[in-house]
Image: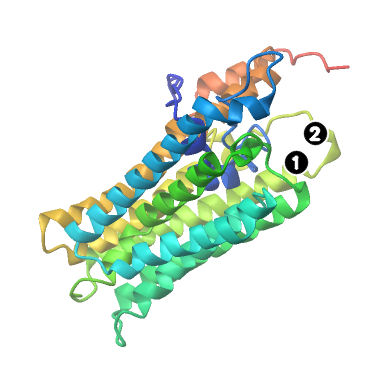
């Protein structure tokens, strides 16, 4: 396949970037370049020789508070606006804000800890799904199937993320954030936004009249199954590869990774496209087409923000001088699995000492 031009990362403010990286952090840990998600570069350090406490007070503290208030207002506006426009139950936004702020105020801020950040995100996903299912006593097969798909997805994601933070003990991307109440709160506010936008196919499908299952449902659920299997197989292959001592300093280019540099991202994107495709059977108004914000937002994070750009930058730093790696990057599709142009036949780079 022809070489794919490198993706330029979209630069987000540090707190926004940290908040929107949960899914990408999960995949990044199995990504082609090892344990990476969104690497947050602190943007609010002190001047050389100046005490941090002094900077936290005065104008610095006011600026941080202003950013926190703006982030809260922005999230409220997006969630409230979409809830009103799409005629969703206000309980969705209520649960999202309530759970995130409960975790933030009761555990995260008092302990200056991010240990439950990803777990709280998965719990909030689950809360919105269950709320959607309980809106009406009788459910159509489509509503049950789409909700079940979302439960499987968030269970898998949440289990991995919780195990990872339990093993690592901390996430260094939050080191600077959690020093200030308002900057730390931005991460939790934007997790509200991430959960709410990503679950739009599920909340919407449980809020509108249901026609019989049709061809779009077959197509959409097939896409979800293919995406889930692709992601699971790619992650399993990566896990097995990295579990061998002889592969510790190598990059994976076997299995699904031979046909795509990020097959797990392809699976993740395909799953949410599938849920939205199935929902299209229920569309009765133009505003409901906003459901496509869900896969678009997810793809933006993975392709332009906290996924591909960060992982490939790290890979370039680690293996950029390896001609085999250069050949792999040049001749392998970035996302969509496709046959590579040719096998590498040149000399391998000398082993590092």
Q: Which residue is drawn at the image coordinates 70% and 47% (left, top)?
A: 239
Marks 1 and 2 sit apart, C-alpha to C-alpha, by 6 Å
Spot occupied by residue 134 in the image (x, y as percentages of width and height) = 36, 80
Within 10 Å of disc 2 (Cα), the crowding (few <14, some 14-19, many 20+) is few
Q: Number of labelled discs?
A: 2
Q: Residue at x 17, y 57 (%)?
A: 85
SS category of the residue bearing label 2: loop
Number of the label disc, if any, that sits on residue 151: none
Per the image, label 1 sits on a secondary structure element best described as: helix
- Which residue is labeled 2 in the image? 248
On the image, the x and y values in percent for residue 265 come to 49, 42
Q: Residue furthest front?
A: 58
Looking at the picture, does residue 328 appear above or below residue 338? above
Label 1 neighbourhood size at 10 Å, few (<14), some (14-19), many (20+)?
some
Q: Which residue is mark 1?
A: 242
Identify whether 244 is placed above or below 304.
below
Residue depicted at 29% across the width and 87% down the height: 138
């Amino acid at each position: 396949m022809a070489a794919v031009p490198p993706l330029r990362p979209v630069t987000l403010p540090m707190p926004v970037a940290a908040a929107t990286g949960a899914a990408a952090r999960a995949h990044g840990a199995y990504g082609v370049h090892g344990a990476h998600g969104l690497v947050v570069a602190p943007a609010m350090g002190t001047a050389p020789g100046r005490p941090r406490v002094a900077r936290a007070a005065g104008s610095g503290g006011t600026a941080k508070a202003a950013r926190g208030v703006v982030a809260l207002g922005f999230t409220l506006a997006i969630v409230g606006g979409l809830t009103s426009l799409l005629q969703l139950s206000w309980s969705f936004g209520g649960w999202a804000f309530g759970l995130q702020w409960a975790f933030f105020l009761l555990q995260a801020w008092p302990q200056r800890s991010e240990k439950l950040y990803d777990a709280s995100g998965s719990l909030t996903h689950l809360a919105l799904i269950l709320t959607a299912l309980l809106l009406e006593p009788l459910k159509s097969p489509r509503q049950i199937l789409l909700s079940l798909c979302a439960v499987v997805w968030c269970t898998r994601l949440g289990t991995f993320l919780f195990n990872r933070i339990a093993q690592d003990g901390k996430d260094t991307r939050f080191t600077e954030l959690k020093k200030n109440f308002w900057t730390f709160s931005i991460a939790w506010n934007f997790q509200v936004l991430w959960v709410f936008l990503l679950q739009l196919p599920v909340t919407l499908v449980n809020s509108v009249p249901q026609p019989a299952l049709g061809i779009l449902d077959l197509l959409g659920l097939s896409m979800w199954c293919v995406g889930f299997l692709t992601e699971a197989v790619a992650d399993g292959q990566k896990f097995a590869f990295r579990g061998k001592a002889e592969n510790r300093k190598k990059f994976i280019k076997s299995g699904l990774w031979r046909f795509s540099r990020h097959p797990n991202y392809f699976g993740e994107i395909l799953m949410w496209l599938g849920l939205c495709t199935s929902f299209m059977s229920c569309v009765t108004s133009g505003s409901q087409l906003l459901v496509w914000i869900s896969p678009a937002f997810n793809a933006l994070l993975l392709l332009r923000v906290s996924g591909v750009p960060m992982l490939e930058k790290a890979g370039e730093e680690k293996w950029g001088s390896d001609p085999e790696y250069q050949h792999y990057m040049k001749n392998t599709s970035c996302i969509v699995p496709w046959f590579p142009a040719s096998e590498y036949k040149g000399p391998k780079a000398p082993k590092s000492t």
